[in-house]
Image (tube, rainbow, N blue to C red):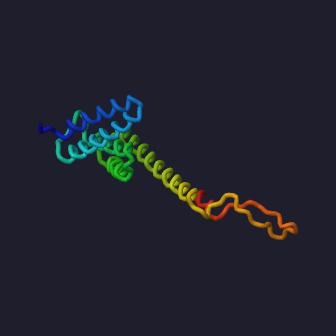
Amino acid sequence: MESKWSRKAIICLKLAWMYRLMNSEHGKEMERVFLKEAVKGLEEAYMKESFPLYGMDNLTTMYLIAEINRRLGNHSVALTWFSNLITSKGVKPNLKELARTQKDLVKEELLLMKKLELNGELLNDESFDLHHEDKLEGSEDNTKISTPKKSFFKLFK
């Protein structure tokens, strides 16, 4: 059976929403499966079909593609679609503002991921010792003080 990409995409999107409502691990897995298929279909439809697609103009479709990619963790793809939408002519102010908000959210997610990656790297780093002891210079009784090693301060860059 031959069908339009947009039709397949919208069906997959609705199935993803239904699985999201299940609020279970299986539901989350299936939601991702159908979101991947939905975004693939929407991208194909965007390139190959004429608008409107299920009542959506090209700008709304761009937003939907960007947002699904964000939810799937495809950050660079999402940023590209959001940026293209924001710089498009004729985009309504409310859609542009929504795209800016979501673009900022993607950037925050990326920043958080980098911080978590750095924390994981530090926690697995054998040279990272928060309780490293050094002798206090000039102390007659050689009192020990606890000082973090240099890699600890990478957290605050």
Where is residue 32, by image quadrant? top left
The residue located at (77%, 61%) in the rendering is 145
Give the left or right position of residue 7, taking residue 84 as reference: left
**Which residue occupies the extreme bottom position in the image?**
138
**Which residue occupies the extreme right position in the image?**
140
Q: Where is residue 49 in the image (x, y as percent from the top left)?
A: 17, 43
Q: Where is residue 104 in the image (x, y as percent from the top left)?
A: 45, 47
Q: Position of residue 141 (x, y in %)?
A: 87, 66
The residue located at (71%, 61%) in the rendering is 147
The residue located at (37%, 44%) in the rendering is 72
For residue 36, above or below residue 27:
below
For residue 45, above or below residue 15:
below
Q: Quadrant of the N terminus?
A: top left
**16 and 56: which one is in front?**
16
Q: Where is residue 110 in the image (x, y as percent from the top left)?
A: 46, 51
Give the left or right position of residue 118, taking residue 1 as reference: right
**Which residue occupies the extreme left position in the image?**
1
Give the left or right position of residue 126, taking residue 143 as reference: left
Q: In which quarter of the image is the C terminus?
A: bottom right
Give the left or right position of residue 123, taking residue 46 as reference: right
